Amino acid sequence: MTGNKKAIVTGGTRGIGRAIVKELAAKSCCGVLLSDVAFIYNSCDECAEEIIQEISDSGTKIYAFKADVSDYEQTEETVKAAIEKLGGVDILINNAGITKDNLLLRMQEKDFDDVISANLKSVFNYTKAVLKTMIRQRYGRIVNIASVVALVGNAGQSNYVASKAGVIGFTKAMARELASRNITVNAVAPGFIQTDMTEKLSDEQRENLVKTIPLGRMGCPEDIAKVVGFLCSNYADYITGQVITVDGGMTM
Ligand code: NAP
């Protein structure tokens, strides 16, 4: 395939998503991939503007779309508009996600539903919306951002863990469904990564967590973005249905 690839990244304004947008657009990942990128965000307009400014002289095209990833109809409209702007879609990164932690005894029904919608239904929404285009062109790279807690569990996060375990199951089902069309579907399971999401942890919680990480530090968003870039590159053409854990050795 020649020319820039065309990528859609959900949750592209902050943390891991922002690093993924930069990896795909601003750098040439694995030396073989450079993408025009449309990213989706929910609330932070200044963050969207900032990232467009940062990437504007990279030689790739970058577009921002404000939409709620858990909304099916909004997704259809947003993806249609993104594909029109980009002139197609080769890569989808399902990254947007939220937490609403609590012990199950105290968890409200809405906290469960909101997390499942933002983290799991969004993956269904966006994957379905790009599928026809990818199937038609017989090429696609889909990467879903899961979490290590989906593999080992975590007290106080039953909604979040269920959503991310769902993302892993969905990844494997889609990998089987789409392999014959040369569309690969993989998941990346980050450990503890320094972003707004983990900012809520107290210093004590953070210190205790770092003690459980053999590499002795929390991850940074770029640690995840580089693996996502690899999975979208032609170095990963023969990898599908996999969950790649990126956690400094915390789970093994
Ligand atoms: P973050 O810093 O909180 O950023 C979340 C991003 O998702 C933001 O760009 C946000 O947009 C967007 N977003 C959230 N809900 C949305 C919605 N309903 N519609 C559209 N966009 C929405 O989070 P992060 O730490 O980078 O996490 C990124 C992904 O990695 C998530 O799926 C998370 O579960 C996963 N993960 C993170 C960690 C970690 O330690 N940080 C570990 C494992 C997995 P706005 O800013 O506009 O709201």
Image: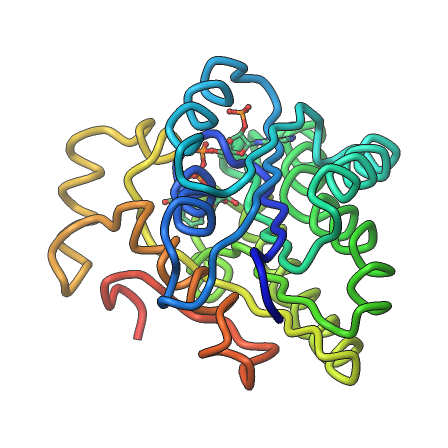
Asked if residue 134 is positioned above or below residue 200 in the image, the reply reads below
Residue drawn at x 75%, y 55% is 127
Residue drawn at x 31%, y 49% is 222
Most distant residue in the top direction: 46
Image quarter where the C terminus lies is bottom left
Image quarter where the N terminus lies is bottom right
Query: In the shown orientation, is residue 61 left or right of residue 80?
Result: left
| Residue 216: percent from left, percent from top | 11, 56
Asked if residue 64 is positioned above or below residue 219 in the image, the reply reads above
| Residue 158: percent from left, percent from top | 55, 47
In front here: 129 or 137? 137
| Residue 232: percent from left, percent from top | 52, 66
Q: Number of numbered discs present?
A: 0
Query: In the shown orientation, is residue 175 left or right of residue 158?
Result: right
Residue drawn at x 71%, y 79% is 182
Asked if residue 24 is positioned above or below residue 143 in the image, the reply reads above
| Residue 99: percent from left, percent from top | 51, 35
In front here: 216 or 188? 188
Query: Which quarter of the picture shows residue 84?
Result: top right
In front here: 16 or 158? 16
Query: In the shown orientation, is residue 108 left or right of residue 239?
Result: right
Query: In the shown orientation, is residue 215 left or right of residue 132?
Result: left
Q: Which colour scheme appears in the figure?
A: rainbow
